[in-house]
Image: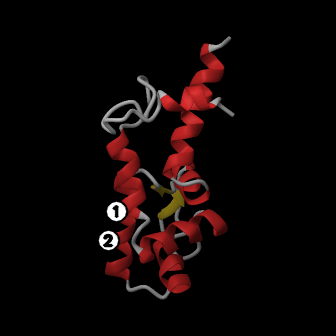
């Protein structure tokens, strides 16, 4: 874990810069968009289901969550847009003729398990580990 002196440079008093490493993979706004996305109960339930159960088709999610198809697709699109879920296509249909399925991304798993602040802290720790070598 990083020392408290390192953390002070991560949270400047003006609150605008420094939360993320300079070469961060994501912008702070992207992390916050992910957090907002799972602030919705349906999206949280969708993501949690995908993390716990693995990849699922929209039909499987509809049945498991008891959510109407159009509502589910709206929320899936929101989760895909912020990078928490990905939509994959099969090259061959499954037994029901479905080609599309959804699965949680590593960011989706991470934000569900750790939350934004911890993910950012992990990015700083990784940067510190690589830069001290």
Residue closer to the observer: 1 or 119 = 1
Q: Residues within 10 Å of mark 2 (few under 14, many from 20)?
A: few
Q: Position of residue 26 (x, y in %)?
A: 40, 37
Q: Is residue 24 visible?
A: yes
Q: Position of residue 68 (x, y in %)?
A: 38, 86
Q: Position of residue 28 (x, y in %)?
A: 36, 41
Which dot marks residue 78?
Answer: 1
Quarter occupied by the C terminus? top right
Give the spatial CA distance, label 2 vs label 1. 6 Å
Q: Residues within 10 Å of mark 1 (few under 14, many from 20)?
A: some
Question: Residue at 57% of width from left, 24% of height from top?
Answer: 127
Query: In this rendering, would 48 be left or right of 24?
Result: right
Residue closer to the observer: 101 or 125 = 125
Question: Residue at 64% of width from left, 30% of height from top?
Answer: 2
On screen, residue 27 above or below 82: above
List the residue tagged with mark 2.
74
Outermost residue on the top side: it is: 133
Q: Position of residue 50 (x, y in %)?
A: 57, 66
Residue closer to the observer: 44 or 64 = 44
Q: Is residue 94 visible?
A: no
Q: How is the image coloured?
A: secondary structure
- SS under mark 1: helix
Question: Residue at 39% of width from left, 30% of height from top?
Answer: 18
On screen, residue 61 above or below 119: below
- SS under mark 2: helix
Contact (Cβ within 8 Å) of mark 2 with mark 1: yes
Question: Residue at 65% of width from left, 67% of height from top?
Answer: 52
């Amino acid at each position: 874990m990083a020392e408290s002196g390192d953390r002070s440079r991560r949270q400047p008093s003006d609150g605008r810069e420094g939360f993320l490493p300079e070469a961060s993979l994501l912008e702070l706004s992207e992390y916050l968009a992910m957090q907002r996305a799972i602030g919705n109960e349906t999206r949280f339930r969708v993501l949690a289901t995908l993390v716990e159960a693995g990849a699922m088709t929209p039909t499987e999610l509809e049945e498991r969550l008891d959510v109407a198809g159009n509502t589910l697709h709206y929320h899936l699109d929101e989760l895909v847009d912020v990078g928490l879920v990905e939509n994959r296509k099969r090259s061959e249909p499954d037994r029901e003729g479905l080609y599309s399925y959804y699965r949680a991304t590593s960011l989706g798993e991470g934000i569900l398990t750790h939350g934004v602040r911890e993910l950012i802290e992990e990015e700083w720790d990784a940067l510190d580990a690589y830069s001290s070598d």
